[in-house]
Amino acid sequence: GSDHWPYCRLNPVFPQPARAECPRTCHAKWTPTALLALVIGLLAFPASAPAQRYAFKHYGISEGLTDLSVMCLLQDHQGFLWVGTQNGVFRYDGRFFRSYSLGDGLPHAVIDALAESPGGTLWVGTHAGLARLEGERFSVVDIGQRTAVATIRFDREGRIYLGTLAGLVIGNPKSGSRYEFQRVFAGPVIGLEIEPDGSGWFGNQRELSRWKGRADPVSARMALPPSAWRKSHTELVRK
């Protein structure tokens, strides 16, 4: 349907020491059948060691992770691990997973993206829009249209960049916790990376574009095949 994304993004999980022994952060997507349990890699030796070894542990229903279709991961600044699934968000505190669902304010059960703002607020992209955590509940954020939000990025000025099924949307912070959103590019954005200064890159199925206040298609100049972004199952890599 129109609210489903024609791709799957996959990034490796890079473990770092932190509270609850969770990986620092990643934005990853798996197909539902590809992952039956959440796997967390723990760094076994110091970074100076010539070779790194990883210990793996599976987390699932017995720990409270009642949906095993993991779509995305994020570790916040406090060390909590947030897990986006096809049936809500879960927070892992090192012992147990606490679930957040539609009853907790989420606009849709399918979670496509997780991100933490520079100020420490958790933001969630779903199949039906954007939400942010306020206390122990989520609040829906109006971005001007109801659409799937698959990528969430921030720059150093606090602006929020959303890769959505309807296009690239940028939110400028206003007074209090309000944002003013504007769609600056129309069409599905299937990968997005933003630099601290607000410039960046995004893919829209058949074209790679450079963003510097406007979209500048670069696929032809970089001799990229036109089908590269439509067929790619990997997220854009920072150049």
Image (spheres, rainbow, N blue to C red):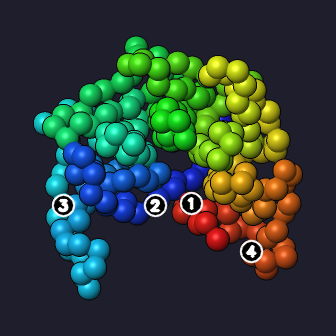
Q: Earlier in the sequence, mark 4 or mark 2?
A: 2
Mark closest to the chain's N terminus, 4 or 1:
4
From this viewpoint, is residue 37 visible?
no
Q: Which amino acid is tagged 3?
A: Phe
Q: Which residue is mark 3?
A: 56
Which residue of the protein is positioned furthest toward the top in this rendering?
Answer: 103
Residue at image coords 47%, 51%: 27
Q: Tell me the amino acid under the disc marked 2.
A: Asn
Q: Which residue is mark 1?
A: 235
Real-space Cα distance between discs 2 and 1?
A: 7 Å
Give the mark nearer the N terminus: 3 vs 2. 2
Tell me residue 29's x, y (percent).
45, 51
Dot 4 corresponds to which residue? 225
Q: Which quadrant holds residue 173?
A: top right
Circle 3 crowding by C-alpha within 10 Å: few under 14, some 14–19, many from 20: few
Q: Amino acid at mark 4?
A: Pro
In the rendered image, which residue does mark 2 sit on? 11
